[in-house]
Structure formats: structure tokens, C-alpha cells
Image: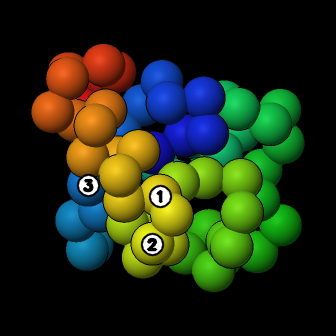
Amino acid sequence: MTESESVVYRVVPKCACSTIGQIMFYSDHGEFFDGDIHDAKSGMHKWAHDDSQPLITRNVENNKSYA
């Protein structure tokens, strides 16, 4: 999910998830992530980050953004 919580994306392997992640990162930061977007530790909310899970859950349950 973008930090601005405007877009939520469930990663699907082999379905352009890296490209979509880079576009989501760009939409919030005005630049692409320098490296593999899957390695980003900040700049996006990710399910793998414990502190992001409640934010993502709330957003999805409330249909707050595009998914």
C-alpha cells in the first residue's frame, strides 16, 4: 500500500508486481525506488512490516482506496 494510502496492491508473482510497486512508489515520492522494490524497507506499507499490517487491514476493510 502506498504511504498516502491511495492504492492497495496484493502482490501476485509473475504478474508485473515489481512494475506496479515501482509505479505506486513513484506516485507518492515522484521518483522510482533505486533498486528492487521488494527490498524497500520504507516508502511503502508492506504486509511483511508488522507496523503496516493494521493500516493495511483497516484500509482494505473500509474500502478506503483503489485495490
Which amino acid type is marked by label 3? Arg
Callout 1 crowding tier (Cα within 10 Å): few <14, some 14–19, many ≥20: some
The residues bearing labels 3 and 2 have C-alpha atoms spaced at a distance of 16 Å
Residue 39 on image: x %, y %: 63, 80
Q: Nearer the viewer, residue 14 or 31?
A: 31
In the picture, measured across the screen, residue 27 lies left or right of residue 45, that is right
Q: Decide which of tag 3 and tag 2 comes sooner along the chain.
A: 3
Residue 26 at x, y percent in the picture = 71, 39
**Amino acid on which disc 2 is placed:** Asp
Circle 1 sits on which residue? 52
Give residue 10's mark: 3
What residue sits right under mark 2 in the picture?
A: 50
Tell which tag, 3 or 2, sits nearer the viewer: 2
Quick one: 31 or 49, which is closer to the camera? 49
Mark sitting earlier along the chain (1/3): 3
Name the quarter where the C terminus is drawn.
Answer: top left
Mark 1 and mark 2 in contact (Cβ < 8 Å)? yes
Please say whether residue 9 is visible from this viewpoint. no
Name the residue type under label 1.
Answer: Ser
Label 2 to label 1: alpha-carbon separation: 5 Å
The residue that appears at 35% across and 39% down in the rendered structure is 8
Proximity of marks 1 and 3: CB atoms separated by less than 8 Å:
no
Q: Position of residue 59 (x, y in %)?
A: 31, 32
Q: Alpha-carbon distance for marks 1 and 3? A: 14 Å
Lateral position of residue 54 relative to residue 57, left or right: right
Q: Which mark is residue 18?
A: none
